[in-house]
Image (tube, helix red, strand yellow):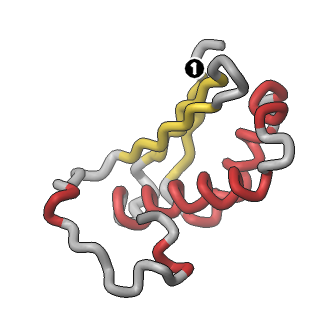
Amino acid sequence: MPANEISMESRLSLIPATVEKLRSDSELRARLEGRELEFYVAVSEALANAVTHGNRNDPSKKIYVRYSCESHDELSILVRDEGGGFNPANVPLPEDIAEDRNLGI
């Protein structure tokens, strides 16, 4: 299946609707059977990180979600923002990494 892409404004309030828009794709939904909660948590956290850390809550910037259903029931999802980026080597791991608020790390 070729890759599909949707976008959203950088507003946290749009995350649930964006996840539902993704789930409206019948082929993607078929890949999620039995893993809907994991999908919802992973995509919601990735979108929240893109809004908050990538685009710094700037609603004039967009978040892009590119997804494709691969062979063997695999699903590929890429979340991209319009932020300035960072060097991952310069980001220290938090000491409280096991806490719920650190799901995106």
- Viewer-proximal residue among 100 and 9: 100
Q: Position of residue 17 (x, y in %)?
A: 73, 52
Residue 21 is left or right of residue 58, and the answer is right
Residue drawn at 46 percent across, 75 percent down: 102
* Residue occupying the far top of the picture: 1
Task: Tell how many labels.
Answer: 1
Residue drawn at 51 percent across, 55 percent down: 46
Q: Position of residue 12 (x, y in %)?
A: 57, 65
Residue drawn at 57 percent across, 28 percent down: 5
Residue pointed to by mark 1: 3
Residue 22 is left or right of residue 4, and the answer is right
Residue 87 is left or right of residue 13, and the answer is left
Q: Position of residue 74 (x, y in %)?
A: 65, 29
Name the residue type under label 1: Ala
Q: Position of residue 9 (x, y in %)?
A: 52, 50
Q: Is residue 66 above or below residue 54?
A: above
Quarter-of-image position of residue 33: top right
**Regarding mark 1 in the picture, which secondary structure is present there?**
loop
- Viewer-proximal residue among 67 and 97: 97
Residue drawn at 75 percent across, 31 percent down: 28
- Viewer-proximal residue among 89 and 2: 89
Quarter-of-image position of residue 27: top right
- Viewer-proximal residue among 8 and 95: 95
The N terminus - image quarter: top right
* Residue occupying the far front of the picture: 72
Q: Residues within 10 Å of mark 1 (few under 14, many from 20)?
A: few
The C terminus - image quarter: bottom left
